[in-house]
Image (spheres, grey):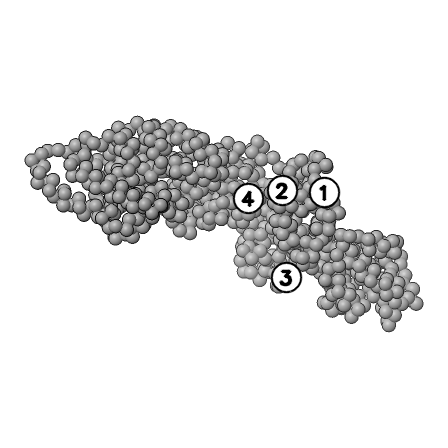
Amino acid sequence: KIYKALCEHRKDGTFIRPAICDTIDKHMRENNIVVITGREGTGKSKICLELASRYDEKDYMVLKVDLSENYLIYTDISNALLIIDDQHYTQYSLNAFMKDLSVLPGRNVQVVLTCRNLELKIVRNVPEINKLKSEAFIDINSCLTPEEKEDILRRHMKKNYIAISASYDSTFRDPKILTDLSVKVTLDDGVINVVRATEPWKGFPLSASLFCTVRTFLHLGEKYFTNPPIYLIEELKELYKTAKKESNCMDKINDFCILVYIMNNKDHQLDLNDHNLYSQLSELYQTLFSINIPKTPGSNEAKTKSIEESLHRMNNKYLRFHEGGYEFIHPCMLKAVLMSSESMVPYLLLNGSLNDIIEFVRSNDYTAYTAMEDDLVIKIGEDYHQILCERLVRCAFDDHSLLLHVAQYMYSYWRSSGNNLVNKMFKHIEFILFKSLAVLTGDFLSLENESSSGNSINLKGPVQFSKIIMLVDELTYKGRDPWIYGPGTSHFVILSALVSAAMGRYATNRDQTFTILLEEFQKRMHSKSFAKLLKKPLDIHGNTCFHYLVLFDEMSALKILSVIKNPEIKYIFDTENVEKYTPIDISVYLGKRHILEVLNLSTNYKIKSRNRLKRLAKSGKAEYYHENNKNIDLPVVLKTKADNAAPENVKCEDAEDEQKEVNNESNKDIRIFKRKYSVRKEPYKVKKRNRNDVLCFEDFIINIVVFGDY
């Protein structure tokens, strides 16, 4: 049998000889025995066959010893390699075998013994083995290098006719491969690079073989290697159910609470010397099982003994002892504990990694997401929407790359779930933006937003206006699918998105997206709170939506103006920002003639105001021709190099004209135009600002409004 196995091994094109084989051979020759330990599928048996093949070539007698039967070693045996690769041995049979082996000194007999992690305790209890040097025990759980893993994976791919392709040609995620075996499977290099860096729960050699032969596993991609196996999750679920059902069974309760404690601990370790250990476990007893452990004075010896017993039960199964503390035997244990009960959901949403949330959390609405076989998901209802929204919003605004992940996650898994989570999420976004931008909100925010978000969302720094535009862009998938705009979404988000759409920032379906947003804008004009928002600044520089509106192409701006039925719109257009510029000033300087015609300002302005606007128009026109003569085609006016063309210098000329007009009109009681609807009753008292920090017809406009570098 062993010879036949050796012949088959030598023909196995998927096996590679890992570097650990040389280490095993070295220590086996030094100690005459080596114990190979590892999880299921790590390649213990294959390594034994590789060693046997080499020793067979050296004329060694290779024997496989079955300790489940009565086996006696002949006393005249020599130059032999004995393989004990069987999990059916007991401590008694192994002890008897080692005693027989001890009578063969100097006979050049080498022994290779394999055991899984769970059987290591049995092996260690054999006196003849336990006294061996630590080098005789070789753990192969993480022995493969990334290069060796990639080699193994590619060999299995070749054997199963799986092609390698660029990412856009990959078909391994195509549902057709699950049902139609004629579909050729292609796997991209990106997935291979991720897989080669993983250490699956089962050994990599076995996982690579199953991944390439079972298409449901292949369809999962890299998740197959990083996720815990379903049977492990089921074991932990059963442990929780048993502990919950039999509340008097403290052994089960202790076991589960210890696993949760390690998961919660920032170092993911349990140290018996930690003085907070017992109090934190007591909290878990109460939280998970509603058990109050009374505080008793005196020694903690009884408590320590109970915890130690649990640790010993789970050692080498779920836990391992490492550097003075107990930790999970494998990283995916953390995910398995997270998925063991609904009690773990709040922890995942609050403290779990964003990657775990994106990977596991889905809507419990069956129309929104249907999990496939072996696809691990946690389905949540509206009870958890609040926590999830706060976490996603916080991540989205903390980091640009995370914002993209959040947007893709929302688009992929929540767009067909009735928008409940989406609407709630944008209430949080609305709250954060108004608060961080110091916008004068008045009564616009609801008490619900204040109470739900005020103390729970903390950002690293202030959120800038352009980030909401960026987030809206991403959430609508660059305008391809404006699914997000439904009943209940934030006024502010609609207005911000309208700014984005009117500026043509969407890559595709720009007209469709703009039309949808414009319809929402028109509906909301009947809301008093939304009408108030038109007069409020959208940023800390006092710019209202109309400061932005006049920078659009005139067609979009006119469409927006056409749905505003407010007769006082011209006064809103006269609202100044921090630098004392109004939307009308910008319109005149940029030559937005059609906007000025709609506003019909010719009869409402004093001579001094009309003269001032004329000078702005001349300056803007001069700057336009100045730049175009250089063959520079820009959508808005850049910073002028001629001082007399700058708007702030126009203000100096205004001062002289205004003094003359005061004398000419001193006897006239003309008060046609008053700024009753200005945001501020008196000018802001602010320190001197950098002119590039506000909206004032310069490079700022290009960077902020066109390229979004704000």
- Label 4 – label 2 distance at C-alpha: 24 Å
The residue tagged 2 is 169
For the residue pair 422 and 153, the one nearer the viewer reads as 153
Mark 4–mark 2 contact, CB under 8 Å? no
User: Residue at horizontal 18%, vertical 47%?
Assistant: 652
> Which residue type does callout 1 highlight?
Val
Judged left or right of residue 686, residue 423 is: right
Q: Residue 431: name its quadrant.
A: top left
From the image, tell me which residue sits under label 3.
322
- Residue furthest to the left in view is 667
Q: Quadrant of residue 116?
A: bottom right
The reply to whether discs 4 and 3 touch (Cβ–Cβ < 8 Å) is no
Q: Earlier in the sequence, mark 4 or mark 2?
A: 2
Label located before the other in sequence (2 or 3): 2
In the image, residue 539 lies at what x, y percent? 33, 44
- Which residue corresponds to mark 1? 214
Q: Position of residue 563 (x, y in %)?
A: 34, 28
Discs 2, 3 touching: Cβ within 8 Å? no
Q: Quadrant of residue 179?
A: top right
Closer to the N terminus: mark 3 or mark 1?
A: 1
Judge by depth and name the residue closer to the eye, 359 or 186: 186
Distance (Cα) linking label 2 and label 3: 44 Å
Residue 358 circle label: 4
Q: Residues within 10 Å of mark 2 (few under 14, many from 20)?
A: few
Q: Secondary structure at mark 3?
A: strand
Mark found first going from the N terminus, 4 or 1: 1
Query: Given the image, on which type of amino acid does mark 4 rest?
Result: Ile
Q: Secondary structure at mark 2?
A: helix
* Of labels 2 and 3, the one closer to you: 2
